[in-house]
Amino acid sequence: MECYGCNSECSRCVRQSKSLEELISELYNGLFQTEPPKAVPDLPGYYSNNQYVGRRSGAAANPHYRPSGMDISYGCCETDMKYETPNFTRINNNNYTLVHLRGRYQFVPVGKCRSSLSCSHGECVQKYRAHWVLVYNNSEVHAGPPVSFVPIKVHSHCECLNIGRPSG
């Protein structure tokens, strides 16, 4: 017999012996931290602050790469990195509360453009990405705790883009 709810017929019901916080902590071990990471490691093969990290070809690192060895400076848009611990999110007109445990949080890395930046061949533009967070969700049927992962839109990094503007 499968046991998905807590009733007298099911002696194996996890919710009868553990608090919701203990259950979430065990099921999602590693998701919650007491403090943000000290630094975001550079991952091989990913872009970091407009610079390619890891093994690369010149063309992959710089679309204006010139094999002749001419080094041209194109400016840089700096990104301020920090961690945030949002409490709420709204998706499809539904409000969700993010899961945080006593003294332990879901830290979300956020990268924002520094103010008053410019780059030599374009504009510094804020870019975004999806970051998945665990939220309380009583609207769906769950075999475990009433939580689910949802994507939230967060600031990712600052990028120098050549944006054409009509001349006035």
Image (spheres, helix red, strand yellow):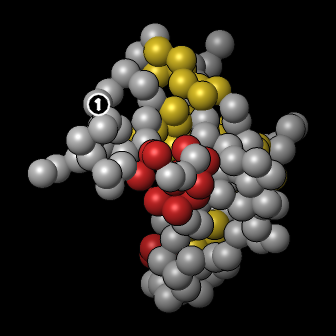
Q: Residue at x 80, y 52 (%)?
A: 103
* Residue 7, visible in the rendered structure: yes
Residue shown at the point (60%, 28%) measured from the top left:
97
The residue at the point 56 percent across, 77 percent down is 43
Residue 26's place in the image compared with 112, above or below, is below
Q: Quadrant of residue 81?
A: bottom right
Report x, y in % for residue 153.
54, 35
- Give the image location of residue 36, x and y in percent: 78, 61
Looking at the picture, how far across and down is residue 42, in whole percent? Answer: 64, 76
Q: Residue furthest right?
A: 116
Q: Quadrant of residue 137?
A: top left
Give the percent coordinates (x, y) of residue 31. Answer: 58, 59
Query: In the image shown, does 29 or 3 lie closer to the viewer?
Result: 3
Q: Is residue 113 above or below residue 34?
A: above
Q: Quadrant of the C terminus?
A: top right
Judging by the rendered image, the residue that carries numbered circle 1 is: 141
In this rendered view, identify the residue nearer to me: 48 or 164: 48
Closest to the observer, 54 or 130: 130
Q: Quadrant of residue 87?
A: top right
Q: Residue at x 46, y 11 (%)?
A: 93
Instruction: Say which element carries label 1.
Output: loop
Q: Nearer the viewer, residue 100 or 131?
A: 100
The local crowd at label 1, few if under 14, some if 14 to 19, many if 20 or more residues have their Cα within 10 Å, is few
In the displayed structure, would residue 164 be above or below residue 102? above
Q: Is residue 149 left or right of residue 153?
A: left
Three-letter amino acid code at the position of disc 1: Val
> Is any atom of residue 78 visible in this view?
no
Left or right of residue 4, residue 28 in this image: right
Image side of residue 163 versus residue 94, left or right: right
- The answer to whether residue 67 is above or below residue 124 is below
